[in-house]
Image (cartoon, grey):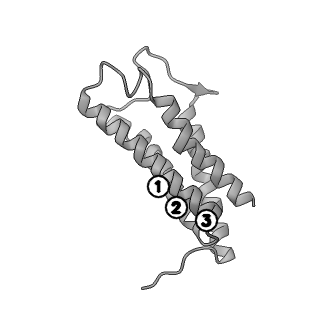
Amino acid sequence: MLDKILLTVGILLYAVVVPVLEINDSHVFNPAWVAHARIHEVWQLITNSSFGLLALWLTWKEAPGRGTASVIALFVTGGFLAAYLLQGQYGGSMIHPDGSEKTLFGINVGVIGFGWVFVTAIFTLMRAGRSGALPRSTL
């Protein structure tokens, strides 16, 4: 049950909380963003939320699905963490146009939140492997 709760909290973070935080003037409706960047932002939000719905279903409806749900969480949050680490290579930033950055104890809240989800997804994936809850390959 702990695995289901951890996965659900992590999934809700990337599938619900992030879209709520980004559908506003600083992201989706940011007039400074070119239209092409906005379509990529909306695409990413819809894709991650769709993966989240699949991961929730796998977490609660299929016993072997928890391992797959963990992998989905690793991909979504790991993608953000990689983009954050590589931001200097492509001119990215978590600093908003007004110069502010959402931090907690000097650490970006996205790194804290998605870092927590990434670590808990590794934890639940390892537990799924030990419990036999990982799907078996047909190869």
**Quadrant location of residue 63?**
bottom right
- Image mark for residue 30: none
Seen as rendered, the residue at the extreme right is: 1
> Residue beneath label 2, please?
71
**Marks 1 and 3, how far apart at CA:** 14 Å
Check disc 3 and give the amino acid type. Arg
- Image mark for residue 66: 3
Which is closer to the viewer, label 2 or label 3?
3
**Helix, strand or loop at mark 1:** helix
**Helix, strand or loop at mark 2:** helix
Image position, residue 54 (x, y; %) = 51, 58
Check disc 1 and give the amino acid type. Phe
> Residue beneath label 1, please?
75
Instruction: State whether residue 112 is above or below residue 101.
Output: below
Q: Badges 1 and 3: C-beta atoms under 8 Å apart?
A: no
Q: Residue at x 43, y 14 (%)?
A: 98
Check disc 2 and give the amino acid type. Val
Which is nearer the N-term, disc 2 or disc 3? Answer: 3
Seen as rendered, the residue at the extreme top is: 98
Check the picture and name the quadrant holding the C terminus.
bottom left
**Quadrant location of residue 42?**
top left
The one nearer the camera, 63 or 32, is 63
Instruction: State whether residue 91 is above or below residue 128.
Output: above
The one nearer the camera, 47 or 134, is 47
Image position, residue 30 (x, y; %) = 35, 21
Image position, residue 25 (x, y; %) = 41, 20
